[in-house]
Image (tube, helix red, strand yellow):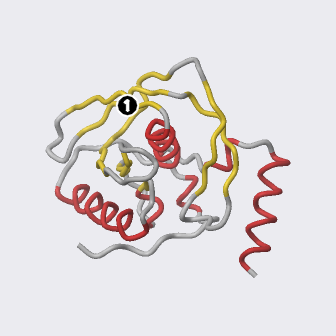
Amino acid sequence: MAHADIVLYPDPRFARPAEPRQVDAALVAVGERLLATAAHHRAYGLAAAHIGVVEPVVVVSFGPMEGRDYRLLYNPIVLSTSTATEAGPEGSVSLPGIEVEIVRPVSAVIGYDDEGGQKGEVSLSGFSARVAQHEIDQMNGIFFLDRLSRLKRDAALRRYRKLSR
């Protein structure tokens, strides 16, 4: 399957939450395109909005930061998180060149549907938990910059505009 073009920030689709729905052939096709795009860009994860589609599917690398062990999650939801949090660097293929510190729980339990519509659950910690939470946020209409104070968000956007010239 061919990879898709990446949609750049700001695009109104980043603010639109995807509605959960039955996993069907059309949603699986979006997932396959998303997976091909993540592999092409060597992204740690992607939400469908990154390829211009507001659908409830994300791809997340479950492996260590150095590798890519991609999994497609349909209708993913964060079921629980640890009370322990940690600041860590986050960026987006839709906002190239920008990385900011975001505080997130260090572990999370994620519920999801697989490509056959079967329910699953996975416990993630460390980097993969961060990636999953980041992409599920995006699927829910929360761009990672939305997690920053207005001052830090404005500074990141000024850096981005400067880089984009």
- The quadrant the C terminus occupies is bottom right
Q: Residue furthest bottom?
A: 165
User: For the point 49% across and 40% down, which residue is it?
Assistant: 127
Residue 34 quadrant: bottom left
Q: Is residue 57 above or below residue 130?
A: below
Foreground pick, 18 / 129: 129
Q: What residue is shown with label 1?
A: 110
Q: Position of residue 116 (x, y in %)?
A: 14, 44
State which quarter of the image contains the N terminus. bottom left
Q: Residue at x 38, y 73 (%)?
A: 4
Q: Is residue 45 left or right of residue 20?
A: right
Nearer the observer, 61 or 132: 61
Q: Is residue 122 left or right of residue 78?
A: left
- Residue 67: percent from left, percent from top: 38, 53
Local crowd size for mark 1, using a 10 Å CA cut-off: few (<14), some (14–19), many (≥20): many
Rendered image quadrant of residue 96: bottom right
Question: Residue at the location (44% across, 52% down)?
Answer: 66
Q: Percent position (x, y) of residue 160?
A: 73, 67
What amino acid type is highlighted by mark number 1?
Ile
Q: Is residue 40 left or right of residue 143?
A: left
Please tell me whether mark 1 sits on a helix, a strand or a loop: strand
Q: How many marks?
A: 1
Furthest residue to the right? 151
Name the outermost residue toward the front.
66
Q: In the displayed structure, would residue 1 be above or below residue 28?
A: below
Q: Identify the residue shown where x is 25% and y is 62%.
A: 32
